[in-house]
């Protein structure tokens, strides 16, 4: 079974209740669910932001898994050691890392 594709968006109403909108309402599939927290506790907002980026985190996990599979030609040439001995990434692996950092930033920026 597949999950509803992103984007997933959490909305808080004026009465502090919340809902999650999953998918694209114009192109489908699309679902909405009410959430059982009231948005007043700071952890509610942090939890909502984590749910919102779940599809992006899944995509990043898939990219990293692909890039690290043994014998995977797509992982060839994904990293190198620079003159100072630091490991640097490039190509599809660099893209996966950039997506991971962006997803992490979305979650962590809501927790500040």
Image (cartoon, helix red, strand yellow):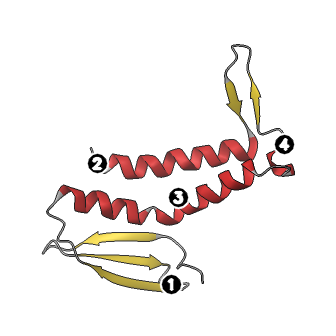
Q: Which one is earlier in the sequence, the residue at label 3 or at label 2?
A: 3
Q: Nearer the viewer, mark 1 or mark 3?
A: 3
Between the C-alphas of marks 2 and 4, the distance is: 37 Å
Q: Which residue is mark 4?
A: 76
Left or right: 14, with 67 as reference point: left
Secondary structure of the residue carrying numbered label 1:
loop
Mark closer to the chain start, 4 or 1: 1
The percent coordinates of residue 66 (x first, y second) are: 73, 55
Q: Tell me the residue at 34%/46% (across/down).
A: 109
- The local secondary structure at tag 4 comes to loop
How far apart in space, not on screen, are marks 3 and 4 (Cα)?
A: 23 Å
Question: Image quadrant for the N terminus?
Answer: bottom right
Quarter location, residue 80: top right
- First of labels 2, 1 by sequence position: 1
Image side of residue 21 versus residue 43, left or right: right
Q: Specify few, some or many for label 1: CA neighbours under 10 Å numbering under 14, 14-19, or 20 or more.
A: few
The residue beneath circle 3 is 57
Could you tell me residue 91's position as x and y percent?
Answer: 75, 42
Between disc 4 and disc 1, the foreground one is 4
- Residues tagged 1 and 3 counted as in contact (Cβ below 8 A): no
| Dot 2 or dot 4, earlier in sequence | 4
Sequence-wise first label, 3 or 4: 3
Looking at the rendered structure, the secondary structure element under dot 3 is helix
In the picture of the structure, the residue carrying the numbered disc 1 is 26
Residue at 29% x, 57% y is 46
Q: CA distance from mark 1 to mark 3?
A: 24 Å
Q: Is residue 36 above or below residue 68?
A: below
Question: Label 2: which residue?
Answer: 111
Residue 81: image location, x then y, percent: 75, 23
């Amino acid at each position: 079974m597949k999950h509803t594709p992103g984007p997933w968006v959490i909305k808080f109403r004026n009465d502090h209740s919340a809902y999650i909108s999953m998918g694209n309402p114009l192109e489908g599939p699309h679902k909405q669910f009410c959430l059982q927290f009231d948005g007043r506790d700071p952890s509610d907002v942090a939890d909502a932001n984590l749910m919102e980026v779940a599809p992006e985190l899944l995509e990043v996990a898939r990219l990293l898994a692909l890039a690290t599979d043994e014998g995977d030609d797509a992982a060839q040439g994904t990293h190198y050691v620079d003159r100072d001995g630091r490991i640097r990434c490039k190509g599809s692996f660099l893209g996966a890392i950039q997506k991971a950092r962006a997803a992490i930033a979305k979650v962590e920026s809501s927790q500040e």
